[in-house]
Image (cartoon, helix red, strand yellow):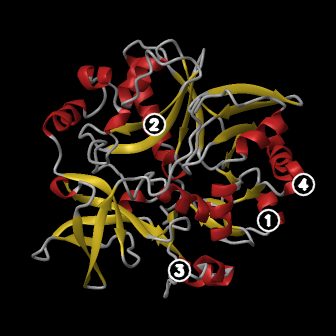
Amino acid sequence: MTPPNVGEECVCYLFLLIYICILDIMSSVTIFSQLTSKTLMSSSVRTISCSSRFKCTTTQQPLKKTALNKLHRDLGAKMVEFCGWDMPLMYPTGVLTEHMHCRQKSALFDVSHMGQLRLHGRDRIEFMESISVADLQAAQENKSKLSVFTTENGGIIDDTMITKKADSLYVVVNAGCADKDIAHMNNKIAEFRASGKDVAMELMGDSALVAVQGPETERIVSQVLGRDLSKMEFMTQMDMTLDGIDLIVTRCGYTGEDGFEISVPNKHAEQFTRMLLDAESGVVVKPAGLGARDSLRLEAGLCLYGHDMDETITPIEASLAWLITKRRREQGGFPGASIIQQQLKEGVSKKRVGLLSGIPVREGAVIVDNDGKAIGKITSGTVSPVTKQYISMGYVPTESSKAGSNVTITIRNKPVKGEVVVMPFVKTNYKRL
């Protein structure tokens, strides 16, 4: 059942778009070193309020705070509202430094605003497969899978991480969709149990979630945990204990780098996070905020829900067909299966692609054909701190989705040439054994 709304719906910050304005690019100049935190705040970071379709249902109450809120403030973070949460946008070094530190060493993100939950009961796998495209029946224990919840029309309700445990499913959902997802799951659980099935949901509101990402992360996390993690595979999970603190350690992330997301009890979250930040004299792991998290995921070609995908977009249109295994394609059994199966067989009219352009393009910019007719739109855009190119994602007609295809983007009513490219925009470094 949907939780009661005791206040008015407020417009939240569902997306913090990092938009870096570069007026002149010269090969002999390191362009990013010239941008100060003041410049970033005044011209590079803009907040986009949610449309009515993506409003966060919250109450007229103070912002929610993660267990690391005091630590963020101690570290000098610039705090912003994000879907009812008080979250760090960036720290004194700035978004660009945080971004590059993640690519070169290790960055720590507070992602405790994400929704963590467990599904229990003998029919939990059948239940999850009935509301998502995930294939969990044959999955190995402690294997994590990225999946999506779908509507009866095949649209994406949200993306989610699901880990198969011996006695439960561990699920993480997006902060901006947590209330919606939990209400949706509660409704489906009620229907499922009414048919005699056994499933129950446990919310993990007493746990924080910390993401540590970057090429030196494995070494540091191994040191702190006192465990050799070099043989831990990407997209797997381990339950660990550190000085009596129970941890859930998942090798995954949202940056394109190797790393871990670690669930820790709220009462131990700051202590544990300081251990990571203080390791090796505090020069390896540095804190990073929402700004760097967004630019990193865009370089990695990863979707942001509510922008690059939503309930009007199917997994096939979003170029996420790889989420659906052969068994699920053949057997269906998830909402919108018939539509998605038809799209897999016959194709779709539009697809999500990566684009390069000569000038910055923002979310909402229209892609047009030779006659000026709108044929697509930009859903995310920034400048890549690594390649120093103007990168974006958007939807174009399938016939224009092949790498090397040229498109025209309208910016301030002026045509700008764009080129479709293969994503990710930078090399990803996920752990491979």
Dots 4, 3 in contact, CB < 8 A:
no
Q: Nearer the viewer, residue 302 or 208?
A: 302
- N-terminal of the pair, mark 3 or mark 1, is 3
Q: Is 364 displayed left or right of 38 in the figure?
A: left
Q: CA distance from mark 4 to mark 3?
A: 35 Å
Q: Which mark is residue 73?
A: 1
Residue 219: which numbered mark, if any? none
Cβ atoms under marks 2 and 3 closer than 8 Å? no
> Does 142 appear above or below 356?
above
Give the quarter of the figure containing the C terminus.
top right
From the viewer's perspective, is the residue at label 2 or at label 3 nearer? 3
x, y (%) of residue 67? 76, 50
Label 4 is placed on what type of residue? Ser
* Residue 126 placement, left or right of 373: right
Between marks 2 and 4 in the image, the one whose residue lies nearer the viewer: 4
- The x and y percentages for residue 416 are 28, 79
Q: Which dot, 1 or 4, sits closer to the camera?
A: 4
User: At 87% across and 28% down in the image, what residue appears?
Assistant: 244
N-terminal of the pair, mark 4 or mark 3, is: 3
Give the percent coordinates (x, y) of residue 288. Answer: 69, 60
**Disc 2: which residue:** 1
**What whole-number distance in Å separates the C-alpha atoms at marks 2 and 3?**
58 Å
What is the three-letter code of the residue carrying label 2? Met
- The numbered dot on residue 281 is 4
